[in-house]
Image (cartoon, rainbow, N blue to C red):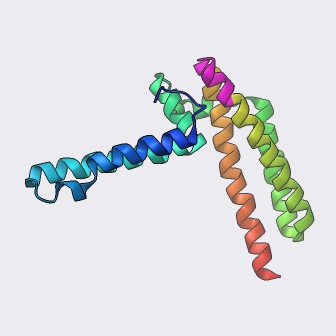
Amino acid sequence: MAPSFSIDASALDAQWKARAAQVHPDRFVNASAPEKRVAMQWSTQLNEAYRVLRDPLQRAKYLCELAGQDVAESASRTLGMAFLSQQMEWREALENLEAAHDGVGLAALLTQVQADRTQCQTQTSQLIEQRDWVQAVKCLNEWMFIEKFLKEVQAVKRAQAATE
């Protein structure tokens, strides 16, 4: 498949199944020990590639890194002040909602952050397709922060639901 953020999920599944059938360790039962080891390595690499390509965030990260961008190294440099301020506001809101056991407010925060994630994902996708790697990495880093924050919000939501 050509490197692209926009992929056809059914084509990806078909490619994975076809390749998996070729390198599956069961096909090498009667092979030598080194051949079995290579088959296992190929199968493991294929499954890892499939996992990365199926996940939009991991796929975006992979494509940026494939283009020579160091996503992890750039995280602290690419986030703008407006985004960092937004993160601080969200964290403060989460703390207040958690302390107040405000499930309605928590649901509203979750909805807002999910909408921002969708917008960030769309923008990252467009920038990758345009090959604007510097801006794509900036958006990707914001998207990664949003994903992490969403997990925190969902954990608070689960904890509140468990105490009710």
**Residue at 74% from the left image edge and 42% from the top image edge:** 117
Residue 86 seen by the camera: yes
**Residue at 19% from the left image edge and 47% from the top image edge:** 38
Of residues 33 and 161, the one nearer the viewer is 33
Q: Quadrant of residue 110?
A: bottom right
Q: Position of residue 28 (x, y in %)?
A: 17, 54
Question: How many numbered discs, if any?
Answer: 0
Q: Position of residue 1 (x, y in %)?
A: 46, 30
Q: Quadrant of residue 145?
A: top right
Q: Position of residue 16 (x, y in %)?
A: 42, 44
Q: Residue furthest bottom?
A: 164
Q: Position of residue 80 (x, y in %)?
A: 73, 29
What main secondary structure does the magenta stretch of the protein show? helix
Q: Quadrant of residue 155?
A: bottom right
| First to last magenta residue range | 124-134
Residue 70 seen by the camera: no
Left or right: residue 14 compared with residue 111: left
**Residue at 49% from the left image edge and 40% from the top image edge:** 12
Of residues 40 and 77, the one nearer the viewer is 40
Of residues 150 and 21, the one nearer the viewer is 21
Classify 67 as above or below 16: above
Decide whether residue 132 is among the magenta residues: yes
Left or right: residue 2 compared with residue 139: left
Name the quadrant of the C terminus. bottom right
Left or right: residue 110 compared with residue 19: right
Q: Residue furthest left?
A: 32
**Residue at 49% from the left image edge and 34% from the top image edge:** 62
Classify 132 as above or below 162: above
